[in-house]
Amino acid sequence: MKYLVHLFLMSMLAMACTQTKKETIEVNVKGEEVSYSTDDITMKGYIAYDASTTEKRPGILVVHEWWGHDEYTRKRADMLAELGYVAIAVDMYGDGKQAAHPEDAMKFSSNVMGNFDSAKARFNAAIETLKSNPNVDTTQIGAIGYCFGGSVILAMADAGLDLKGVAAFHAGLQLPVMPGDDLTARVLVMNGADDPFVTAEQIGNFTSALEATEADFKFINYEDAVHAYSNPAATELGEKFNLPLAYNAKADSASWEEMKNFFNTTFTTK
């Protein structure tokens, strides 16, 4: 009798394992270099998607830190592709240009945000490139951004660009375009509570503007987190250039989960 019971349990276990294997969804992330342009500049981006399915899915733009379009930006695009999105790592500086020093990073980022019409044209070119991918549901477009990139996507949403939702990681909040009547996107801002680059006054001005427009937004402060908390290279860069940058694994993980939930509720299909 014990033998029969044991045999039955082993059979059920084997069936369960087989069923689990059948339910496992294989993801085949494919990354492709892409070039796109405005009238005056060519940009070098990167698109990532799950090649194991042909279903249309939401598209998400990923905007880099002030260092420029780099492997970290592409890694985040790959991570979004693993979640079932099509993601484009954007090049806001053009020609894939990267900064090796904070002085160059400040110059590059200031040149972009100091000419917002040009910045908007570059961002719109990235949107159209993303929409042209055959895997993208063109009615479901969102964006994420880091530091400089977070400021970019917030400003683009404020300017009324075609975005369902934007999720900003440790972004600057002094924007060339503040929240107003043109804002239709949902907004998620994930800030380091100890970030010296973002003051309480700036937070108050930004959230007050969002409240005045009755925007759908969420603002989160992560304790013990400073600027660039989501980037594992931040601590080394902070020490190298004597800047208040540091990686915070807890805030990184929590903010990514927050972003996942945000887009799950933002897009009507996924």
Image: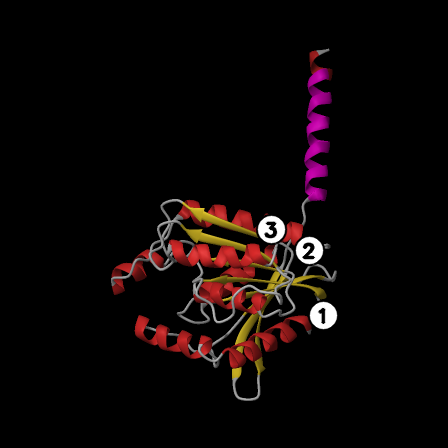
Callout in the foreground (3, 1): 3
Q: Nearer the viewer, mark 2 or mark 1?
A: 2
Q: Horizontal and vertical percent for residue 97?
A: 43, 78
Q: CA distance from mark 3 to mark 1?
A: 24 Å
Q: Is residue 251 magenta?
A: no
Instruction: Report, in whole angstroms, how far the alpha carbon at label 2 lies from the one at label 3.
Output: 9 Å
Residue 134 tag number: 1
Question: 153 or 73, which is in the foreground?
Answer: 153
Q: Which residues are magenta?
A: 5-23
- Quarter of the image containing the N terminus? top right
Image position, residue 110 (x, y; %) = 40, 76
Where is residue 200 drawn, in percent x and y?
A: 39, 53
Q: Residue at coordinates 39% horizontally, 49% vertically from top-left? A: 193
Which residue lies under the disc numbered 2?
A: 267
Q: Is residue 11 magenta?
A: yes
Q: Residue at x 70, y 32 (%)?
A: 16
Say which residue label 3 marks.
262
Determine the secondary structure under disc 3: helix
Residue type at the position of mark 3: Phe
Q: Quadrant of residue 100?
A: bottom left
Quadrant location, the C terminus:
bottom right
Label 2 residue SS = loop
Q: CA distance from mark 2 to mark 1?
A: 18 Å
